[in-house]
Amino acid sequence: MHLVTVADLRQRQRPKGRPADPTAPVHSPTVVVNAKKMNPKIKFTYLILALGLFSCKVLKESNTKILPEFSIQGKSFNELIVNRIPDYGLTGEDGCIVENQIKINLDNINENYISGKISDVDSTEPLINAEIQLIFESDTILTRSNNKGEFEKRFKDELKKIKATYIAYRTVEINLK
């Protein structure tokens, strides 16, 4: 994104050898400020405003943080989530980055089989093609959710962790052991 004046754009759009037409329309995807001579402090203020408007996803309804969730057969086990409360977000170290959160509900988990559903915490919409990593002592198996957000996998070793990732969502890591 560029911050330019209308006069700058007209100067750039003029045909070679002709003076700039002050009445010519301006066609540009840039942020335009209508001023012939602009104070550098004002330009800086516009730049900060533009960055604030277009670079952060902010929760407008409230300042409540939405956190990832983990359950087995409908019973909450959120305490197994590694770093459940992030150190970033509206009040965190990294400024205004707020990502969507993942909810994992396991329908079945035993010594050699796992099945469940992965969805958005807030909307409960299924996360299609989300990546689920099953982490063992010496190996990792990858699987993906289907078009209903469901996944299942058979395995041989003792499952230590589950890690779920999805584009524009905060990665969730579950420590089972």
Image (cartoon, helix red, strand yellow):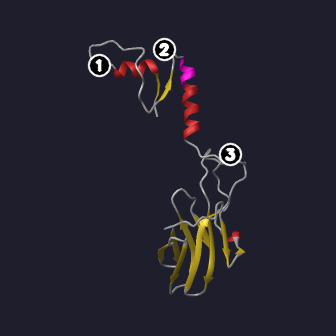
Amino acid carrying label 2: it is Lys
Residue of label 1: 15
Q: Nearer the viewer, mark 1 or mark 3?
A: 1
Q: How many labels were placed on the picture? A: 3
Residue 176 appearing in the image: no
Earlier residue among tags 1 and 3? 1
- Disc 1/disc 2 C-alpha distance (Å): 20 Å
Q: Marks 1/3: CA distance?
A: 46 Å
Identify the mark nearer the N-term, 1 or 2.
1
Instruction: Give percent across and percent down for residue 145.
Output: 51, 72
Residue 171 x, y percent position in the rendering: 56, 62
Which residue is tagged 3? 60
Q: Residue at x 50, y 87 (%)?
A: 156
Question: Disc 2 on helix, strand or loop?
Answer: loop
Residue bearing mark 2: 36
Q: Position of residue 159 (x, y in %)?
A: 56, 80
Query: Of residues 29 and 86, which is closer to you in this image?
Result: 29
Dot 3 or dot 2, earlier in sequence: 2
The location of residue 10, given as percent across then percent down, is 39, 19
Residue at 67% from the left image edge and 60% from the top image edge: 67
Question: Quick check: 103 above or below 14?
Answer: below
Q: Secondary structure at mark 3?
A: loop
| Amino acid type for the residue under numbered disc 1 | Pro
Does the stretch in magenta take in 42?
A: yes
Disc 3 vs disc 2: Cβ atoms closer than 8 Å? Answer: no
Instruction: Compute the Cα span from label 3 to label 2.
Output: 36 Å
Q: For the magenta stretch, what is the residue range?
A: 39-43
The amino acid at mark 3 is Lys
Q: Bin the neighbour count of mark 3 within 10 Å (Cα to Cα): few under 14, some 14-19, many 20 and up.
A: few
